[in-house]
Image (cartoon, rainbow, N blue to C red):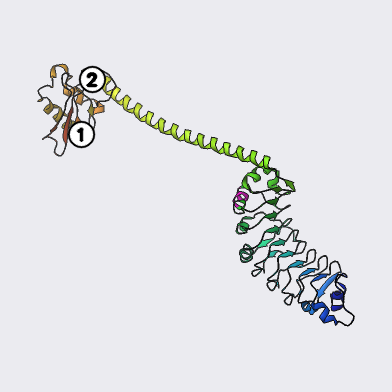
Amino acid sequence: MVRLTMDLIIRGTSGYAKKKRDESSQHFIKRLTHLYLEDRNIEEVSDDLTLCRNLMVLYIYDNKLTKIPNLNGNGNLTHLYMQNNQITKMEGLNALQKLTKLYLGGNCISVLEGMDKLSFLQELHMENQKLPTGEKLLFDPRTLIALSRSLQMFDVSGNGIDSIYDLQCLQLLTQFTANDNLLSNMKELAVVLGSWPHLWRIDLAGNPLSHKAKYRDRIIIMAPSLEMMDGKEITDTAKKFLQNWQASREAAKRKHELGHQNGSSYAHIAATGNGIERRLTGAAKCLGNDVPGYIMPALPRKQFQEVLARSTSHPNSGQSNHKSYSEISSHPRYLDTSSVAYQDSTESETISTQSSAIPGHKLSVIKMGSDFAHGDNTEPS
């Protein structure tokens, strides 16, 4: 087992910083800013690393670490490279409040967590975690909220992810990489991309949605700020063409919907008008050309007959040219009436009288032109 000790730390300076002849080892490592410990088969890190108070960049990738080392004394770290180890849990990172870039790809981490205080982190690389079959990388909501204040670049490729809906809060993202996952929902993607107004690069190759028709065109329309997709540049000409195509398509859709609504309204009006016309025409045909007027249904038979009997007292009623009242009242379409209108061939006034036989009802007698009485379908004015 290889353990990181002070001697290995001193040899990990790669010659850019040299220990002075009379300088102590502790003093020397205190002034180190960069440390190169990659690919040394390191499995464990001693507390000597905490003595590197001024350390800003630590390369400790391609080793055999099973956990994140104690970095509580390395508060000045801005870049931490720990990819391709065997780390299973994210812990001990909140002490690194100046951290801007974190590389943890190729480990065995199943939950993105433990970064609630990393308010300056701009790049996070979590690609290709070595997870058991059927498992996927999960996201702690508290960590996502904390990262939303600063994160700009996020790589979660190859982690079995089937949804990125929870990542909407990362509104400062400019680059997002999620190749070789299980993303298939274009509608969800449209919602998420709508929450990332600064995104200029996206990589989604190897997902089920990348095989859908017009995949590239649809995503370019979803995210107008994109400049690069799946490693290929998006030209201004292509973007403008797709935007114009989408605008014309939406305009045509709105026009079609408006036409459908208007057509429904016209059809309803026409159907209503035709129904009234058919009823008026039917009444005229049933009662003949000598009909005294249009009789509106509502009253019981007995009251209707009494109304007709009383209406004969009008001086211009002209009974000689009418059908018998019993014949009219017996017709099934006019058994009930609340008012009655009859025609006079010489007058066009409207007369309303109170019928004593029908308490609470007003008898309306409407004088109409002879054209309507003789089969014209024009409604009375």
What's the amino acid at mark 2? Answer: Ala
- Can you see residue 300? no
Tell me if residue 62 is in the magenta stretch.
Answer: no
What's the amino acid at mark 1? Answer: Ser
Pinpoint residue 363: horizontal percent, then vertical percent: 16, 32
Residue assigned mark 2: 373
Against 159, is 338 above or below?
above
Determine the residue positioned at 76% across, 68% down: 87
Please tell me in which quadrant of the rendered image residue 125 appears. Answer: bottom right
Residue assigned mark 1: 338
Lower sequence index among marks 1 and 2: 1
Name the foreground residue: 368 vs 122.
122
Between marks 1 and 2, how big is the CA–CA gap? 20 Å
Badge nearest the viewer, 1 or 2: 2
The quarter of the image holding the C terminus is top left
Q: Secondary structure at mark 1?
A: loop
Against 34, is 200 above or below?
above
Name the foreground residue: 35 vs 354.
35
Name the foreground residue: 66 vs 26.
26
Q: Which region of the structure is painted magenta?
A: 187-191
Please tell me in which quadrant of the rendered image residue 174 appears. Answer: bottom right
- Can you see residue 321? yes
Magenta: main secondary structure equals helix
